[in-house]
Image: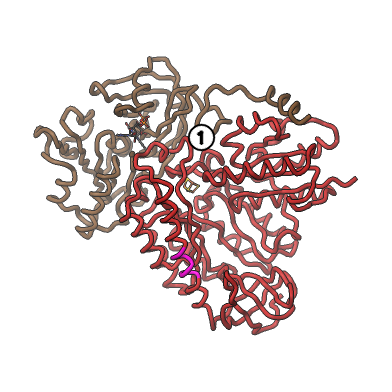
Chain colours: A brown, B red
Amino acid sequence: MKKNQAAKYSLLKPNIKSLSPVSDLMPLPVYRLHEIRDLTPTSYIMRFDRNNMEFKAGQHITLGLPGNNQLREYSIYSTEHDPYLEVLIKEVEKGMVSKSLHKCRLGDFLSVDGPFGFFTLDENNLGKKNLFIGTGTGIAPFHSMAGSYPALDYSILHGVRTTDETYESSFYPTERYISCTSRDDKGKFKGRVTDYIRKNPVGSETIVYLCGNVEMIYEVYDILVSQHFPVDQIKTEVYF
Amino acid sequence: MVKKVAFKTLGCRLNQFETDALATDFYNAGYKIVPFTEKADAYIINTCTVTNTSDHKSKYTISQAIRRNAGSVVVVTGCMVNNQKELLEQRGDITYVVENNRKSSLFSLVDAHFKGEILHPSDLKQSLFDFTVAEKGFHTRSMIKIQDGCNNFCTYCIVPMVRGRASSRPVEDVLQNIRQVVSFGYKEVVLTGVNISRYEYQDTGFEDLIEKILELEGDFRVRISSIEPEGFGDKFIKLFAHPKMCPHLHLCLQSGSDRVLMQMRRQYNLHQYLNLIEGFRSNYPDFNFTTDIIVGFPGETDEDFNQTCKVVKEVGFSHVHTFKYSVRKGTRAERMPGHLPEKIKHERSQIIRDIAEENKLHYRQSLVGKQQTVLIEKVQKGFARGYGEHYVPVKISGEMPKNTFNTVTIKGLSDESDPQLIGQKTSKSAS
Ligand SMILES: Cc1cc2nc3c(=O)[nH]c(=O)nc-3n(C[C@H](O)[C@H](O)[C@H](O)COP(=O)(O)OP(=O)(O)OC[C@H]3O[C@@H](n4cnc5c(N)ncnc54)[C@H](O)[C@@H]3O)c2cc1C
Ligand code: SF4
């Protein structure tokens, strides 16, 4: 008897194709892809509908292909004022989503959820000096912050292997952008962001934002602590 | 014939709150609530999926119910449904599978069933907060759901996926709910939700909400259930000076290592956490902290773990809910390198448990000679039992009316395996 009931009910189950790990029960909204801008052979910017999404610079979305329950977080690269959404993605070796998104074609639909996250500028500190430290695509939230708040007083330390990976750095005023290159000497600083901080201690009035891989974040954090920098003024966004 | 219904709750306080509310719906409609171990016409299982163990327990409980009374209605609801709905439906032996957002209407489904009407769970109204006030007979304290869901996405956690996005209950609904339970005679309200410190309804934040609750009239006290160390500031600490606030927080730490906290994508670092503890303890030296710790998170080194042990000792958490990290499908941590063998997790968990036992004893001893205001929950075999404001169990010799506040002096600890504070009455019952 109960088996029959269950069978009857399963006929009524909604037939949802786009499953997300967020919930097997809620299909996510889909956003149309308008542009893919290749920055290097393995890193690219995707532009898609904004669909009136309200977000704060620094927040991220989760993104994936409709019908596939693999979603990944990507910081919003575009600004709070742009009519579209953009993300900056680097293909990860053996990566499932970062590679498959790169194969999308214009007009395709993407599953998007969000915005999420608390890695945002503190309204009370907007007038203060900000130091943004990011490795690789970890520059994405800073692009959004800098573009959304043109009057912001900031410097960016961008850790990359070579200057090819400095991703649209002409967007930032030259004096605000410092590339730290570990594998060539064409950057403004030869070495890692950690080397830069060791040589150039951070002033205690600064608000520091760290974004990228956990090793870099942890190391910078340690260096700042050793420089007696107030840890309450450090915000972190760990990518992996 | 009166229909019998039995409930089983797994997991968190929020689930417990929701079960109590459901049981009240059935009770009010004339159903008889029976223990889960008895034969019933309907078994309602409110599941949890937060760890592998919760999954196993949930599945085991479902099987128990099915075996107990062939032909009974078996309803499965809760977080496991949101995580594994299809699997549960495919089993074929569960009568109804109800998602979290339809849980509050579960009574109408079962009641219709017994009246010969067949509803489908998807016909039920969706609501996160439309729960009936729990019948007073079930507990002395009433849980008040102020919030549901979470947007934090800690890398190990499945809750945002099964409970959905953060959503706060309207202020007036919360206040009305409290007025109602206080008028029913409840003496303690426990604010509960998934991530309550992120409460935000229009312009009212978490601290503002508490302030409004404290302004309500009536003889009751306010307890905060499990809370994340984020989203509040000094104002929150100051609120505990109010006589209605209970000086206890279950303040989730998860790890004492900053590196692990970062990989968990927690929203605080150790320094901030310890600052908070210090902020409370400098104002309220006896403040009771309990916490959650996850051991064996991917990549957790001996050094990370030792750091956690050190913090657990230093803070002196009087209770630690220790979880061995377990993979939840679809979470970021699932894809992280460095997953640890079960043996290491087991050993680490035992070490934390041992420290926590010592802490507990130490904290309880520190209350000897001090006063506690005990809300009596049980009177049995010549002893009254209840919890003091610090959320430590107290045993008092003699008869005392249930559900009354009593000020007692703590004379010592009982020699039970879980030592209780021994209280001696110092004044007349406060209510
Ligand atoms: C809040 C947040 C924001 C993020 N924003 C961005 C962003 O703006 N741009 C961006 O490119 N990425 C960003 N990421 C990382 C992104 O979410 C994915 O982790 C990344 O694209 C890899 O996904 P995948 O499916 O291709 O790889 P997976 O199939 O998930 O992983 C494959 C292997 O690569 C490892 N791995 C995972 N991520 C990385 C990584 N980033 N670098 C190196 N190894 C990795 C995994 O441990 C695994 O072994 C962000 C992550 C978070 C948490
Ligand atoms: S705060 Fe983190 S651990 Fe708590 S429910 Fe949200 S995601 Fe899970």
What's the residue at 25%, 43% (across, down)?
A132
**Picture quadrant of residue A190:** top left
Q: Position of residue B54 (x, y in %)?
A: 57, 46
The boundaries of the magenta stretch are: B354-360
What's the residue at 69%, 68% (across, down)?
B377
Q: Nearer the viewer, residue B393 or B27?
A: B393
Chain letter, disc 1 residue = A
Say which quadrant the N terminus of chain B sits in: top right
Say left or right for B388 vs B139.
left
Q: Position of residue B365 (x, y in %)?
A: 51, 77
Residue B265 visible, this orientation:
no
Say which quadrant the C terminus of chain B sits in: bottom right
Q: Nearer the viewer, residue A1 or A127?
A: A1
A120 is higher (above) or lower (below) than B230: above
Residue that lies at the very extreme toward the front in this rendered image: B343
Q: Residue at label 1? A: A22
B209 is higher (above) or lower (below) than B50: below
Say left or right for A208 vs A27.
left
What's the residue at 42%, 29% (across, down)?
A63
Q: Position of residue B386 (x, y in %)?
A: 65, 70
Label 1 amino acid?
Val
Residue B112 visible, this orientation:
yes
**Picture quadrant of residue B189:** bottom right
The local secondary structure at tag 1 comes to: loop
B393 is within the stretch colored magenta: no
Q: Position of residue B5 (x, y in %)?
A: 78, 47
Say left or right for B29 vs A66.
right
**Picture quadrant of residue A205:** bottom left
